[in-house]
């Protein structure tokens, strides 16, 4: 599930950068990857539509990254709860 979120996010970013900033497909993919990874933009953006897209994509990237990490980590945490017998019910 986390991989699907990442692939969809990269596709949205690459298509958006390609059409709003007029970058090549490789540069668009590179910019989308760097924003999703938290590194920031690589190519300069000279038009307003590209700046608006980059702003919203950066906000989305934070949410997509946190969501994919939560999906990836939740089975590990769930298993740890079972291993250490952590129960959500409290006994009075």
Image (cartoon, rainbow, N blue to C red):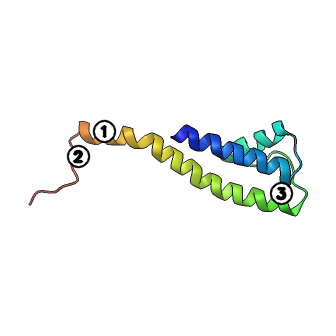
Residue matched to label 1? 80
- Asked whether the residues under the numbered discs 1 and 2 touch, taking CB atoms below 8 Å apart as contact, a structural biologist would say yes
Secondary structure under tag 1 reads: helix
Q: Earlier in the sequence, mark 1 or mark 3?
A: 3
Q: Earlier in the sequence, mark 3 or mark 2?
A: 3
Image point (80%, 43%), residue name: 28
Q: Nearer the viewer, residue 4 or 79?
A: 4
Secondary structure under tag 3 reads: helix
Q: From the top left corner, tell me how far across and down residue 42 is, in percent.
A: 81, 45
Q: Disc number at residue 86?
A: 2
Find the distance from the CA under tag 3 to the CA under tag 2.
48 Å
State which mark lies toward you, 3 or 2.
Answer: 3
| Image side of residue 24 versus residue 58, left or right | right
Residue matched to label 3? 50
Tell me: residue 46, above or below residue 23.
below
Neighbor class of circle 1 (other Cα within 10 Å; few <14, some 14-19, many 20+) is few
Image point (76%, 40%), residue name: 29
Q: Is residue 4 visible?
A: yes
Neighbor class of circle 2 (other Cα within 10 Å; few <14, some 14-19, many 20+) is few
Find the distance from the CA under tag 1 to the CA under tag 3.
44 Å
């Amino acid at each position: 599930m986390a991989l699907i979120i990442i692939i969809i996010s990269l596709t949205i970013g690459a298509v958006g950068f390609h059409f709003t900033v007029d970058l090549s497909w490789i540069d668009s993919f590179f910019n989308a990857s760097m924003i999703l990874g938290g590194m920031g933009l690589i190519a300069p953006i000279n038009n307003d539509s590209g700046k608006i897209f980059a702003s919203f994509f950066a906000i989305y990237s934070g949410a997509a990254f946190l969501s994919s990490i939560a999906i990836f980590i939740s089975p590990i945490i769930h298993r740890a709860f079972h291993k250490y017998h952590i129960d959500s019910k409290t006994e009075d």
